[in-house]
Image (cartoon, rainbow, N blue to C red):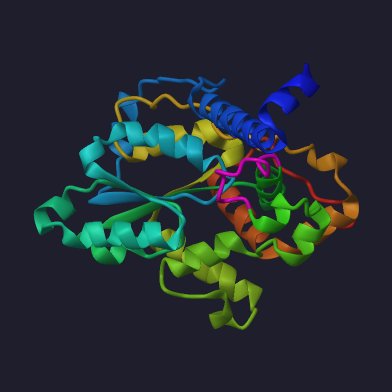
Amino acid sequence: MKHFVFKLLGTERCTRLAQGLGDLSSKAARYVERNSPGPGFSNVPIERNADFKTAYDRLVFLRLGHTGSWSFWDSISQCTPTRNRVSIDWKPEDLNAALDHINSLSETDKNNIQLIGLHCAYPVHTHFSGTTKYVTLLRDPVKTAVSKYFWQYNHRHDLSADWVCSEIRDGMSLSAWVENIMPDSIYARWILRLNNKEIGDFQNRTEDILTECMVIINDMFLMVGITERFDESLYMFSCLSGQHAVPLWRHLGQSNAPRIEDLNPAILKRIEEKTDIDRQLFALCKDRFMPPGMVDCGGYTGTKSG
């Protein structure tokens, strides 16, 4: 039967047909993944905690990649009407288009924006008057790095996924990606840029970088949630933003990465080295988020030598 189809349509047409079916299948799988309910639905009333609400004019959710930010944004955006929120994606042209739109608004319409989803490092608050507060989620940076690689690797055959880097699409290994492409200190870099600063400004002084990040967090953030405590983070957001209930959430975008413990220790050691600042920043924020005595069972403990 296969030979008959090839003979009837020709090799080139069959190749295009197979590629088209593959693309369609991939898009269908991604649609189901993004829109089907997951194991995290909740709708908890929280009126008794309304006094926790903090004063601000608008919120910006800093969407760091591979931290559960997709699910978090999908949830918290339910709390704000479409006309009062803006989502800014990661491409430069997306940022420019969003800023052009914001700057074209009247002051009244601009002030009506209550929630911004920011999927890039940019001080968007500088385009608004009043008080803007940021919110973000931090996840164990080693898990984040592994997830970033395998999310791209598992979508490398999807030609519509323009966020897959060409090296991974060509089959680059995790080890080679970590050594040659994986960015370092993403959490710290993004947070510093909210205040128009760069890691280079501190001449590689880790302690100064961490101190400045915490100064920015204390001054500009409503809260920093922890992915390993997703439900608690969403609950805290709902209290601080004055919601009547915790909004429903869906588990979106799994990378299907292997267990950290099953990866090559040498690769893990290199990831630890490149995420050293972020791991320290994550630890500082997690210590603040989790009350004394709370047991954390979801974090990565590091290699034996790390």
Q: Main SS type for the magenta part? A: loop
Which residue: 70% across, 39% down? 154
The picture places residue 163, in percent across and down from the top left corner, at 57, 51
Image quadrant containing the C terminus: bottom right
Q: Does residue 51 appear in this view?
A: yes
The answer to whether 191 is drawn above or below residue 148 in the figure is below
Give the residues in magenta. Answer: 154-164
Front-lying residue, 167 or 38: 167
Q: Residue 142, image x and y in percent?
A: 72, 51
Q: Relative to the observer, which residue lies in front, 287 or 203?
A: 203
Q: Residue at x 25, y 37 (%)?
A: 82
Q: Identify the residue at image location x=55%, y=43%.
A: 160
Q: Position of residue 77 (x, y in %)?
A: 35, 36
- Please state which of residues 149 and 215 is positioned toward the viewer in this rendering: 149
| Residue 236 visible in this rendered orientation of the protein | no
Is residue 94 part of the magenta span, yes or no? no
Vertical order, 89 against 180 (above or below): above
Q: Quadrant of residue 101?
A: bottom left
Task: Reply yes or no: does residue 156 show up in magenta.
Answer: yes
Q: Quadrant of residue 237?
A: top left
171 lies left or right of 286: right
Dividing the picture into quarters, in which one does residue 186 lie?
A: bottom right
Q: Which residue is found at the position 34% from the left and 63% from the top?
A: 96
User: In the rendered view of the protein, which quadrant contains the N terminus?
Assistant: top right
Q: State the image coordinates of residue 72 (x, y, percent, origin top left).
A: 46, 37
